Image (cartoon, rainbow, N blue to C red):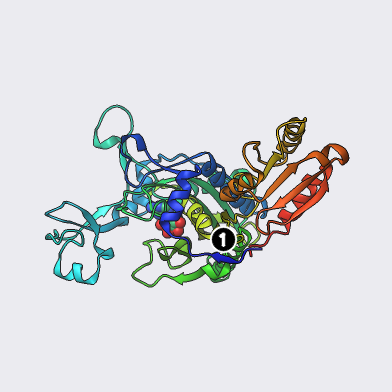
Amino acid sequence: MAEEVKTQVTMDQLVSLCKRRGFVFQSSEIYGGLSSAWDYGPMGVELKNNIKDFWWKAMTGMYDNIVGIDAAILMHPKVWEASGHVENFSDPLVDCKQCKLRFREDNLEEENRTSRTCPDCGGELTESRQFNLMFSTHLGSVEETGSIVYLRPETAQGIYVNFKNVLQTSRQKIPFGIAQVGKAFRNEITTKNFIFRTCEFEQMEMQFFIHPSEDRKWFEYWKEQRWEYYLELGIRENKLQFHQHGPDELAHYAKDAYDIQYEFPFGWKELEGVHNRTDYDLRRHGEFSGKDLKYLDEATGERFIPYVIETSAGLTRTVLTVLSDAYEEEQIDEKEGRTVLRFHPDIAPVTVGVFPLVKKDGLAELAQDIEKELRSDFSTFYDQGGAIGRRYRRQDEIGTPYCVTIDYQTKEDKTVTLRFRDSMEQIRIPIDEIAGTIRKSTKAYRRV
Ligand code: GAP
């Protein structure tokens, strides 16, 4: 067993591992990089997709009153007038007259804010001005005002404008929810913290439509559900906390809002928001589009604009969360240490590593056959290079929860060694029990 576990990962350690093992690369790196944009490598894309699937199942799979959609990123420009984003979605920004760096005024230290000096070079700062966070572009080939469209800054609006379509086609009744995962864009000032805050990111949002009189009940319900979800995802509970928005923090659409925060290496920060958006969005879309977005309760005959409880999680921010939470360096014995990512098995990029002890005497072929068999159930990785200990370390570093080793005994009695990432325990089992044992262990998985 491990003698010492170091759990306080630094951002430098994370960034370095992500690059080294193919999780995340700087965008356009060969051209010197594009600040605050990141690319997901072979391991990163698997991790991100697995988290997306985990969330999707937790929403549309576990509730028969939640359905999904996938709306376009580009929407009618009126959507963003109705939603209040054209008017309200801005940050107060200041520029340094000397070094030209730009800062969010509300993020400046008290000292720099009052003396109006640049935190970087000491130069004089400009007056603050509101800067809208939406990216705009032009639809079609003519650059005229009439053709301006925005890249969506939240996926939620694609759900609101489809409220009636979904209602009419899915035979849902209130209360019910619509879930969506997709890209969102914000022209943010992002200088540090890797993939935490980026201009292009992904969100996993669910809008739950309810009767206005039941908003407290459903708000509490979704706060609880979302907390449980993170425990199921394998996040340590002592790294999570709720933070209620004060009046100065509330978004323009929100009556009440709680963040679920995670303790990142750079402090407690928002991972997800649970918002009571009231009837704000549907009411405004009704007004701006001239369409009737009221709901008719057939049982009571009541017609009303539903309230919305929103759960809004960052997908790319969850990638950073699970990486921060999973990363550990531990000393195995006096000589050897290892870096291990303790991902929940359901989200690990590779579920099973398969190794022949040696390449010769038919062991490689046997191992390849076993690996091919396992492919239909799990994501697998075959590795025959180097000492077996080193092959285990390589899998530990990308968070592979199970490794299967084929040796001479396998040829005789059709058994293999199954090795568990977290405990490093090894057990001997028949080949035809590998899949079942892995499934059982995954189901019982609890982060230690
Ligand atoms: N629809 C509501 C909404 O968008 P938000 O609090 O602005 O609410 C929700 O964003 C979540 O989206 C955040 O908790 C965060 O996880 C993620 N997010 C927001 N801006 C982000 C950015 N610039 N980079 C990465 N993730 C971001």
Residue 303 seen in the figure: no
Question: Picture coordinates of residue 255 (x, y %)?
Answer: 43, 67
Question: Picture coordinates of residue 75 (x, y %)?
Answer: 40, 41
**Amino acid at the residue labelled 1:** Glu
How many other residues sit within 10 Å of disc 1, few (<14), some (14-19) or many (≥20)? some
> Mark 1 = which residue?
330
In this view, 290 is above or below 242:
above
Please name whichever residue, 198 or 221, is drawn nearer the observer in this view of the structure: 198
**Left or right of 111, for residue 220:** right
Question: Picture coordinates of residue 317 (x, y %)?
Answer: 46, 54
Question: Picture coordinates of residue 191 (x, y %)?
Answer: 31, 53
Q: Quadrant of the N terminus?
A: bottom right
Please name whichever residue, 446 or 300, is drawn nearer the observer in this view of the structure: 446
**Left or right of 139, for residue 410:** right
Secondary structure at badge 1 equals: strand
Residue for point 66% across, 41% down: 379
Ligand 1 lies in quarter: bottom left
Q: How many marks?
A: 1
Please name whichever residue, 393 or 140, is drawn nearer the observer in this view of the structure: 393
**Left or right of 164, for residue 284:** left
Q: Quadrant of the C terminus?
A: bottom right
Residue 225 seen in the figure: yes
The CB of the residue at mark 1 lies under 8 Å from ligand 1: no
Residue for point 14% across, 60% down: 125
